[in-house]
Image (cartoon, rainbow, N blue to C red):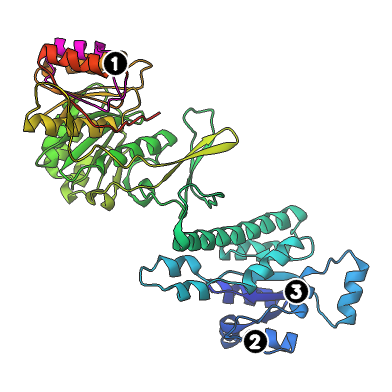
């Protein structure tokens, strides 16, 4: 039995080779792998001694030779194949152990050059892997050092069956496919990435098996990808509590997306992937208290996200209610001690939360057997708001309208947000009618709506929202415009002394 060992990541390879030797396997190798095995008294044969052809072109050509690939690809069941090997003096290769040049690590270095990337595109490695995987009935292909112990154990027990061979072959093809996707996406970015490409290549790594999906009868898992530009929950450090559930992941990402919109200290409370309380303030404690007071009932069992370090004072307030997850860029040591008193609360540290930025990236949504792809909603409103009423809003009202529209952008359509002094007072969303959403938001705000502002993610089809807002003494309204009835809404505002501004930017979130 003969094996070829050619690995860049040499984790466990010496121990694995020694076990192969004990089992009577002849080892051939090349380059750094050969030198490492030789220095550890392993009787490896150099590839060039097998091929009788010296490696050349700075090592680009080593294993690309009939005496290697003939030995790998020959189908042992086909007599003509075996006769050809004998005629050409080619020894069959039964085990291929290969991992690839570190392309991902190289291009992750911000100081790398294009030439660095090109030189780390492996050619011989993927070719051997694919050859062995294709001929898996005759050749065992090993691409992951985590499989070394199991392979040895199965060889000792003579329990390597066809299903195990297929399992390793599938893993091998997955390895080369992922590698090619990384290279393709890298070169696409350099050549000028098409926002809506003709082909989408994604490679997703399973990060966590979840207990269940949205409901207990649904299986689920969490995957992340280096191919997708947006970075969020996958960058977080888990500090305490049970593993995140499927719904937790959704809710946390929704909270993070909204929190990243603000440069001031902010607290975002989320329930079922939609905000239930949001506030900006001079410090994280005040932001939390005001977000909590928006809807003391809905925040229970929800998610809280802050873009500043959580201090002891804030932690004490948080611990007064039940929350599923608290996520922040950091926690004071004393704050962590306090929050960890509740052993099941999930605490996540996401340092990126302090970096205010609205980045454009691609969003994917599964749809039956296909996907919808769109750019993320990275706009808010123009620098200059279009005042369309006789009455102009005050400077404070303009600030509140901008705040309310930022929140509305992250509320499910139809979205209505009532706010004052940098805090939400009532949020309505996900209704089939805009007036239903307005009623929900204004009823939640109650008497606190007096003198507040109202934001809508899309235009008013009728003047009924303005009429209702006037009953709660709303002083200013911000909306995109675009309805044939815009004039009716403007007239209704003028009749009631309400100022209104148009943004021209809609924020549907379905």
From the viewer's perspective, is residue 417 above or below residue 195? above
Circle 3 residue: 69
In the rendered structure, are the residues bearing label 3 and label 2 in contact, judged by CB atoms less than 8 Å apart? Answer: no
Residue 30 in view, yes or no: yes
Q: Badge 2, how many Cα within 10 Å: few under 14, some, many 20+?
A: some
Q: Is residue 157 left or right of residue 214?
A: right
Residue marked by disc 1: 485
Q: Residue at x 63, y 68 (%)?
A: 126
Q: Is residue 473 shown above or below 55?
A: above
Q: Which residue is mark 2?
A: 55
Quadrant of the image for the C terminus? top left
Q: Looking at the image, tell me whether mark 1 or mark 3 is earlier in sequence order.
A: 3
Percent from the top left, x then y, of residue 371?
53, 38
Where is residue 7 shown, x and y percent of the image? 58, 74
Residue located at (9% from left, 27% from top): 393
Q: Is residue 472 visible?
A: no
Q: Which residues are magenta?
A: 459-483
Between tags 1 and 3, which lies in front? 1
User: Which of marks 1 and 2 precedes in the sequence?
Assistant: 2
Query: Does residue 280 appear left or right of residue 55 in this picture?
Result: left
């Amino acid at each position: 039995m003969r094996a070829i060992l050619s690995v860049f990541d040499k984790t466990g390879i010496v121990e694995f080779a020694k076990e192969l030797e004990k089992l009577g396997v002849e080892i051939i190798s090349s380059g750094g792998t050969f030198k490492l095995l030789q220095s550890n008294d392993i009787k490896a044969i150099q590839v060039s001694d097998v091929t009788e052809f010296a490696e050349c072109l700075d090592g680009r050509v080593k294993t690309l030779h009939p005496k290697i690939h003939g030995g790998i690809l020959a189908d042992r069941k086909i007599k003509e194949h075996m006769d050809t090997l004998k005629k050409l003096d080619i020894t069959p290769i039964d085990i291929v152990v290969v991992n690839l040049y570190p392309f991902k690590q190289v291009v992750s270095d911000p100081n790398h050059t294009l030439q660095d990337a090109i030189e780390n595109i492996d050619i011989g490695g993927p070719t051997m892997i694919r050859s062995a995987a294709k001929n898996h009935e005759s050749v065992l292909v090993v691409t992951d050092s985590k499989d070394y112990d199991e392979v040895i154990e199965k060889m000792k027990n003579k329990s390597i069956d066809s299903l195990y061979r297929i399992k390793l072959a599938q893993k091998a093809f997955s390895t080369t496919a992922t590698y090619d996707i990384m290279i393709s996406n890298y070169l696409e970015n350099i050549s000028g990435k098409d926002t809506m490409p003709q082909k989408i290549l994604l490679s997703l790594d399973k990060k966590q098996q979840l207990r269940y999906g949205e409901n207990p009868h649904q299986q689920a898992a969490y995957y992340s990808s280096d191919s997708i530009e947006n970075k969020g929950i996958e960058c977080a450090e888990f500090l305490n509590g049970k593993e995140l559930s499927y719904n937790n992941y959704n809710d946390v990402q929704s909270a993070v997306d909204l929190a990243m919109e603000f440069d001031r200290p902010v607290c975002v409370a989320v329930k079922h992937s939609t905000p239930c309380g949001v506030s900006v303030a001079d410090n994280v404690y005040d932001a939390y208290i005001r977000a909590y007071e928006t809807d003391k009932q809905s925040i229970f069992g929800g998610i809280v996200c802050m873009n500043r370090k959580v201090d002891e004072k804030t932690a004490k307030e948080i611990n007064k209610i039940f929350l599923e997850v608290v996520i922040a860029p950091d926690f004071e040591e004393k704050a962590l001690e306090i929050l960890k008193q509740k052993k099941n609360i999930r605490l996540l540290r996401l340092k990126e939360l302090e970096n205010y930025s609205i980045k454009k990236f691609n969003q994917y949504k599964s749809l039956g057997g296909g996907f919808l792809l769109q750019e993320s909603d990275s706009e808010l409103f123009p620098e200059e708001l279009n005042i369309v009423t006789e009455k102009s809003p005050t400077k404070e009202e303009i600030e509140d309208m901008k705040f309310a529209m930022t929140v509305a952008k992250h509320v499910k359509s139809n979205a209505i947000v009532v706010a004052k002094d940098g805090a939400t007072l009532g949020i309505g969303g996900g209704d089939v009618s805009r007036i239903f959403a307005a009623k929900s938001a204004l009823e939640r705000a109650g008497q606190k709506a007096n003198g507040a502002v109202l934001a809508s993610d899309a235009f008013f089809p009728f003047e009924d929202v303005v009429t209702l807002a006037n009953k709660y003494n709303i002083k200013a309204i911000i909306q995109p415009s675009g309805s044939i009835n815009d004039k009716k809404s403007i007239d209704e505002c003028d009749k009631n002394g309400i100022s209104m501004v148009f943004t021209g930017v809609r924020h549907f979130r379905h």
